[in-house]
Every structure is written in structure tokens, then in C-alpha cells.
Image: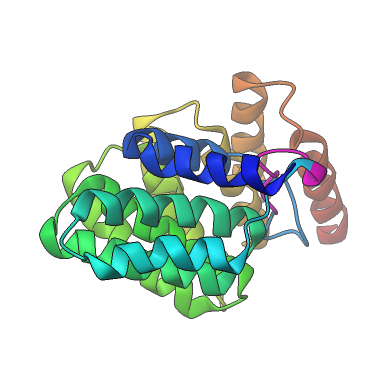
Amino acid sequence: MEKKVLTIALLSLIAGSTIGFLVANRLNRSELESLRTENARLRAPAQPVDDEPTLSDEELRTRIKKADDDPSDIRYQKNLGVALYRYASMKKDVALLKESTRLLKRVLAADRDGFDVNVALGNAYFDIGYFGSDSAGYAESRQYYETALKKKPDDASVRTDYGLTYFLQQPPDYSRAISEFTAALRSDPKNEKALEFSTQAYMKLNDSANAHKTLEQLKAVNASNPSIAGLASAISANAGAAQ
């Protein structure tokens, strides 16, 4: 893809609806692969690797400078902050993820309880923790997820991501993760990600009975979910090791 096209693509992102970005982020987040060393999964890229846009440092600096030159333009801070998050997450660029949080915090100062901004910041810090292998990022993301959940406690997607911060932190807190996944499933019994990670968390706690139960629920929701085979194999292996 030529640079001109890439530049237009980012400008289109910046000009687009913030709500649209956040929905896209949520979908991207829901594409975490089934198992990665049994307790983490890489998200599927938003598009094939060969087609991923690449923007020059100059292009990025120009847009960030515009935001810094007029920090009172909250709409621009919000749109650019979320666009940068999307791009940095795709590129697994921790430094640029941190830059996105800097812009989004300006928005948060003007709208402390804003649901969308708190979710965006939670997602950005989640990815800082994930891509940077830094548990502090997960801890930071929690405060924003918690604020968002006070406004919408039944949002199953945010609740699941909140639970994942406990699942992926070092050391993990599988019991707390299960508690959050269970809460997410009360709101959305068909939430596949909550069912997948509940199964993994139960296995980590050597609770094969509940792991089998949540796996069966996942099969009932979507029998073609790609994580099922791996989860079933892991449960069988755990059961065999316990004998």
C-alpha cells in the first residue's frame, strides 16, 4: 500500500466516529486466539500482515503535534487518541500506545466518567501490559475498566477484559478472574471469550469438573469455536495426569 493511501486511511480514521472506533476495538479484542502457552493468546490481526498500513514517524509526529498545539480541542484529542491506539495495537508498538494514553487522558480530564474514554484507556493499558509483558499495565487498565463498569456494570465485554487482567497478570489471580468471567456470563451467557477463559482458569486451578462444564457451554454456544479442540485436549491431559 502506498504511503499516500496510508495517510488518507489514517486521516479517515481520525475523522471518523469515536463510537465506531471503540466498537472496532471491541471486535478486535474479541479475536484473541484460543491458547498461547496455556494462559494467553495473541489476537488475530485486523487484516493480513502484508496489507497492514505503515505510517512514517513524521506523519505520526505531525498529527500528535497538532493535538499538542491545541489541547483544548477535545474532539480531536479523542479521535486521534483512539486512532493511535488502534494503529499502535496493530503494530504492537508500546511507545505509541503510551502516546495514545497521553492524549486520551486529556479527554478524561474533561469527562471523568465518560464510558467510551475509560474503556479506550483500559484497552490501551491492557495492551501495554500484554505487548510489553508488564503486569503494571494490567493494574493500570483496571482502574479505567472499573470506572467504566460503574457506569455500565452489565457490559459483558468490558467485564471479560477486566477479568483477563487478573488472568494474565503475574502472578495470576485465577479465582478473581473466574469471578469476573462469571459476572460477564450472567449478563451475556453466550460470551465466548468469557467461556473460553473460564475454562482455562478452572484448568489452572485443577477444577476439571467446572472446566468441563464451561467447555460444554461453549460448545452449545458455538460448536465451531476454534479453541474447543485445544481446550478439550488440555482437559483430558489434566484428567490423565491426575490419575
In this rendering, position of residue 159 left or right of residue 88: left
Span highlighted in magenta in the image? 42-50
Please name whichever residue, 128 or 226, is drawn nearer the observer in this view of the structure.
Answer: 128
* Residue 120 percent across, percent down from the top left: 37, 53
Tell whether position 113 is magenta: no
Evaluate whether residue 184 shows in this view.
Answer: no
* Residue 127 percent across, percent down from the top left: 53, 62
Evaluate whether residue 109 shows in this view.
Answer: yes
Location of residue 118 by image quarter:
bottom left
Tell whether position 45 is magenta: yes
Above or below for 208 versus 216: below
Q: How many labels does the image show?
A: 0
In this rendering, position of residue 21 left or right of residue 1: left
* Residue 227 percent across, percent down from the top left: 74, 38
Task: Tell me which residue sits at (33%, 40%) in the image.
Answer: 18
* Residue 239 percent across, percent down from the top left: 81, 51
In this rendering, position of residue 113 left or right of residue 223: left
Location of residue 172 by image quarter:
bottom right
Please name whichever residue, 81 or 234, is drawn nearer the observer in this view of the structure.
Answer: 81
Task: Tell me which residue sits at (40%, 73%) in the image.
Answer: 139
Task: Tell me which residue sits at (45%, 47%) in the image.
Answer: 160
